[in-house]
């Protein structure tokens, strides 16, 4: 087991009150496996990734639960040790919008070398061959080393950022919407690169996106998030081909399809207010299959199929 | 730095104003280097502010080159010094020095003085006599007789005197000279009787360097070769005098004239170059370093530290600077380091506030977050990612602050709070102002230091102006 997260809670304090962005999440990941996390904006995807990497914003009020990486509990590690031992060495990250992840006034080579200098105490000139090696892995020419970010194309910058994530050879990479700012062909290139890396390097990946199709391309497992909960989780096939949660079903139905006469469906209503979440199931105000019990009690965790997990009353024992 | 250095340089070099600035600054540095090499380190205390050092110079006279603008030939300053003597024995042993000089000016010299250096005597002190032979063949006998005083108390020979500072007699102030002139006139010009008091009132130079007209008044100058004979009558064969000196005080002096103490202003003005640059650079460098470090820390770290730094900056920024500067320098003492320290203390806060606001924006960039995720320490992020964002701004601020520091020091000096051991342009201005140079029309004392202050400030402004197109796109982006 590479990563095991259990009962992770995280909330922010705002003027309006406490926002429960991550509300009791359980998930696990094996090495060489990719977990796709999908969900609409504000469902807690990015908060989850920030929680795992401990990049907590200043206004975090609650942060509890358990995150075990390679058998080591990360929650108890003090911040400074976490920075030195876990960040980037164990968990690296590819941020939304590669173009913004690079300092415009520093050449990209030295930027990619930074983790080596910070964590391995390497000299800049010793780090250079390693950077060029990793550039080769992601398909960048050697002379990229001396380029400024503005001299590179979007796809190249994306590769630079991925190269940077790989440079310390971490067991886990979190990719937060890595392709959202790229056009489709570059997206495809990047996805192929990621798939290759996953296979060659046996890296665990958490792939965060709102694009289910893109996620299904790379993910072995998929988790659907809604209002701070993972409402459904299973193998990619299970989630895509036989979604169990009404939200997943609606989400998939809203995807436009080529050569189909059916109109894409939509989900009525707005995402839940996480300061004042609805009682019972978070999704019930928008759910076309909502029952009375959904409004009153939190949904149970059910296992309708082997390896598939759903939080929904449709599959639970209502009398319990 | 982020931008391509070569492009930035060519951009900078493209404008005339920056070429001018660079030329000026090279000149300033060259002069400063020359001064640092050729001047003694204790110039201020041992030379500039020691009146004895300038005693032989004429007081408050304009530069030599003003001659080119007038038809009247003003006397040049002549210092006639010799250590060559012939020894004679006419009953008593005498040492005879001779100096001769040409006098061609249309006006009388400002003063005349005579001095002897390093006199050694074994028995009774020698007597020194001066005889001056004029171009018309007339000789002023015993123009000056100096009986060297006996040493006080018990003494063992040899007695060595006048080593550090020579024995100096100003002829206009010596009653012996007045008497000698009076008797010379009576003897050589039959019908002219001038009392010693009259000589004292008009100055002996009028008669030494003058000839009477038909009415017997001395208006014309006797031009030609004068020969001064110095006779040292000794009472022991071992007595010596190292050198004698006769000064014909000019009415013009040097390249920049002199002040009321006879100080050569060109020397002081030259010394002002390295001092001004030193004050400017030290102050601006330390100020911008503190300002930048504080601003970046304040902006990036946030929280209580931010509040603390910003409130201190606000307070420092809103205090009226000049009165506090005066107050602090007065309390701490007039020392160059105190002045620099006070300027730095009040200088950094403005920059800190500016830099912080830029950092607040810069730190929200995603690459900063990415760097945090990499596990970089705050210090690393501030140095590697935040600093380059604000570096061009900091750099121009540093250049702008240099003339500000020079001007602030000049202002303090002008108020009489300068470091007395280091002459600066501000202090020269202050002395001039105090001595009434403005009312007396001693322009050579007031204008050059003022111009030099302006020129130095201007030089940095030129460079900053030239740099502006280089750094401006980035500044605009970050503001």
Image (spheres, rainbow, N blue to C red):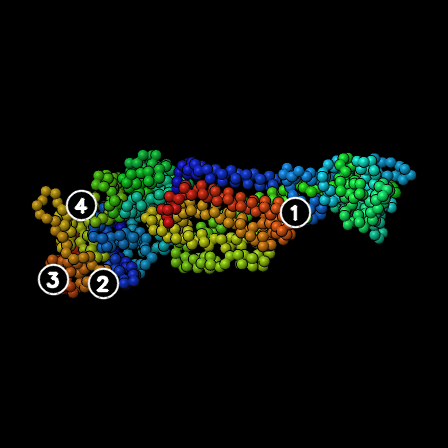
Find numbered disc 1 in the image and state the secondary structure of the residue it sits on.
loop
Which residue shows up at 48% across the image and 58% down it?
B316
For this view, does A8 lie left or right of residue B409? left
Would you say B92 lies left or right of B163 here? right
Residue A291 badge: 3
Judge the density around disc 2: few (<14), some (14-19), many (≥20) Cα neighbours within 10 Å.
few
State the residue in front, A134 or A235: A134
Mark nearer the viewer, 1 or 2: 1
Q: Residue at x 51, y 55 (%)?
A: B345
Residue found 31% across the figure and 38% down from its top: A152
Residue matched to label 1: B259
Labels 4 and 1 share a subunit? no
Residue A129: in sight, yes or no?
A: yes
Q: CA distance from mark 4 to mark 2?
A: 31 Å
Foreground mark, 4 or 2, reads: 2
| A116, A32: nearer the viewer | A116
Please determine if labels 1 and 3 lie on a single subunit.
Answer: no
How far apart, in angstroms, are the residues tagged by discs 4 and 3? 30 Å
Chain-order first, disc 2 or disc 3 = 2
Any mark on residue A213, and which? 4
Q: Secondary structure at mark 4?
A: helix
Residue neighbourhood size for the residue with mark 4, other residues' Cα within 10 Å, grouped as few (<14), some (14–19), many (≥20): few
Q: Position of residue B296 (x, y in %)?
A: 42, 51
Q: Chain of mark 3?
A: A
CB of mark 1 within 8 Å of CB of mark 3? no
Q: Which of the chains bears the disc numbered 2?
A: A
Q: Is residue B134 left or right of residue A160?
A: right
**Mark 2 or mark 3: which is in front?**
2
**Which quadrant holds residue A12?**
bottom left
Mark 4 or mark 1: which is in front? Answer: 1
Which tag, 4 or 3, sits closer to the chain's start?
4
Marks 1 and 3, how far apart at CA = 103 Å
């Amino acid at each position: 087991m590479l990563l095991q997260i259990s009962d992770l809670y995280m909330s922010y304090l705002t003027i309006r009150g406490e926002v429960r962005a991550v509300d009791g999440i359980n998930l696990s990941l094996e090495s060489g496996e990719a977990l796709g996390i999908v969900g609409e904006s504000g469902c807690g995807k990015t908060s989850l990734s920030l929680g795992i990497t401990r990049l907590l914003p200043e206004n975090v009020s609650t942060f509890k639960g358990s995150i075990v990486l390679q058998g080591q509990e990360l929650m108890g590690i003090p911040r400074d040790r976490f920075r030195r031992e876990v960040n980037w060495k164990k968990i690296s990250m590819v941020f939304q919008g590669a173009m913004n992840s690079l300092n415009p006034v520093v050449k990209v080579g030295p930027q990619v070398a930074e983790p080596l200098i910070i964590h391995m105490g390497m000299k800049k000139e010793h780090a250079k061959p390693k950077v060029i090696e990793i550039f080769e892995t992601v398909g960048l020419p050697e002379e990229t080393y001396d380029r400024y970010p503005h001299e590179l194309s979007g796809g190249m910058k994306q590769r630079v950022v991925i190269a940077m994530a790989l440079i310390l050879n971490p067991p886990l990479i979190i990719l937060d919407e890595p392709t959202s700012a790229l056009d489709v062909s570059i997206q495809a290139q990047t996805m192929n690169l990621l798939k290759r890396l996953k296979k060659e390097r046996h890296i665990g990946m958490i792939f965060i996106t709102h694009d289910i199709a893109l996620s299904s391309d790379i993910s072995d497992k998929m988790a659907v998030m809604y209002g701070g909960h993972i409402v459904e989780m299973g193998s990619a096939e299970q989630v895509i081909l036989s979604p169990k949660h009404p939200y997943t079903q609606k989400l998939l139905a809203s995807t436009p399809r080529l050569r189909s006469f059916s109109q894409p469906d939509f989900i009525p209503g707005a995402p839940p207010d996480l300061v004042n979440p609805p009682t019972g199931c978070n999704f019930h105000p928008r759910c076309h299959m909502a029952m009375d019990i959904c409004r009153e009690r939190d949904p149970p965790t059910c296992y309708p199929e082997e390896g598939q997990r759903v939080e929904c009353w449709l599959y639970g024992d209502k009398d319990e | 730095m982020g931008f391509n250095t070569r492009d930035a340089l060519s951009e900078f070099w493209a404008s005339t104003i920056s070429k001018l600035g660079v030329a000026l600054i090279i000149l300033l540095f060259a002069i400063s280097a020359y001064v640092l090499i050729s001047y003694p380190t204790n110039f201020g205390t041992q030379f500039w502010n020691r009146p004895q050092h300038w005693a032989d110079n004429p007081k408050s006279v304009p530069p030599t080159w003003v001659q080119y603008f007038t038809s009247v030939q003003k006397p040049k300053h002549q210092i006639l010094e010799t250590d060559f003597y012939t020894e004679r024995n006419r009953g008593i042993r005498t040492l005879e020095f001779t100096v001769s000089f040409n006098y061609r000016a249309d006006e009388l010299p400002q003063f005349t003085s005579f001095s002897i250096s390093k006199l050694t005597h074994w028995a009774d002190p020698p007597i020194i006599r001066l005889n001056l032979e004029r171009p018309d063949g007339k000789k002023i006998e015993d123009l000056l007789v100096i009986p060297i005083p006996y040493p006080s108390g018990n003494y063992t020979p040899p007695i060595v005197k006048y080593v550090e500072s020579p024995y100096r007699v100003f002829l206009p102030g010596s009653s012996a000279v007045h008497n000698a002139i009076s008797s010379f006139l009576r003897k050589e010009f039959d019908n002219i009787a001038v009392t010693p008091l009259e000589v004292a009132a008009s100055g002996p130079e009028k008669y030494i360097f003058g000839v009477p007209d038909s009415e017997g008044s001395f208006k014309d100058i006797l031009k030609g070769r004068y020969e001064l004979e110095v006779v040292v009558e000794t009472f022991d064969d071992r007595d010596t005098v190292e050198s004698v000196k006769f000064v014909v005080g000019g009415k013009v002096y040097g390249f920049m004239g002199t002040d009321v103490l006879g100080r050569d202003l060109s020397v002081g003005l030259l010394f002002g170059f390295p001092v001004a640059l030193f004050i400017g650079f030290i102050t601006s460098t330390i100020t911008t370093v503190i300002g930048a470090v504080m601003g970046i820390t304040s902006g990036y770290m946030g929280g209580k530290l931010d509040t603390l730094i910003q409130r201190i900056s606000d307070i420092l920024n809103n205090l009226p600077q000049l009165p506090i500067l005066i107050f602090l320098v007065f309390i701490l003492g007039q020392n160059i380091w105190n002045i620099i320290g006070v300027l730095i203390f009040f200088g950094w806060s403005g920059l800190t506030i500016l830099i912080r606001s830029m950092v607040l924006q810069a730190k929200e960039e995603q690459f900063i977050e990415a760097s945090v995720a990499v596990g970089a320490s705050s210090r690393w992020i501030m140095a590697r990612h935040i600093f380059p964002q604000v570096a061009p701004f900091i750099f121009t601020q540093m250049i702008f602050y240099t003339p500000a520091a020079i001007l602030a020091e000049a202002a303090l000096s002008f108020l009489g709070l300068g470091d007395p051991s280091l002459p600066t342009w501000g202090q020269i201005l202050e002395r001039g102002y105090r001595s009434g140079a403005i009312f007396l029309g001693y322009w050579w004392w007031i204008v050059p230091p003022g111009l030099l202050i302006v020129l130095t400030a201007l030089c940095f402004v030129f460079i900053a102006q030239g740099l502006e197109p280089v750094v401006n796109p980035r500044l605009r982006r970050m503001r």
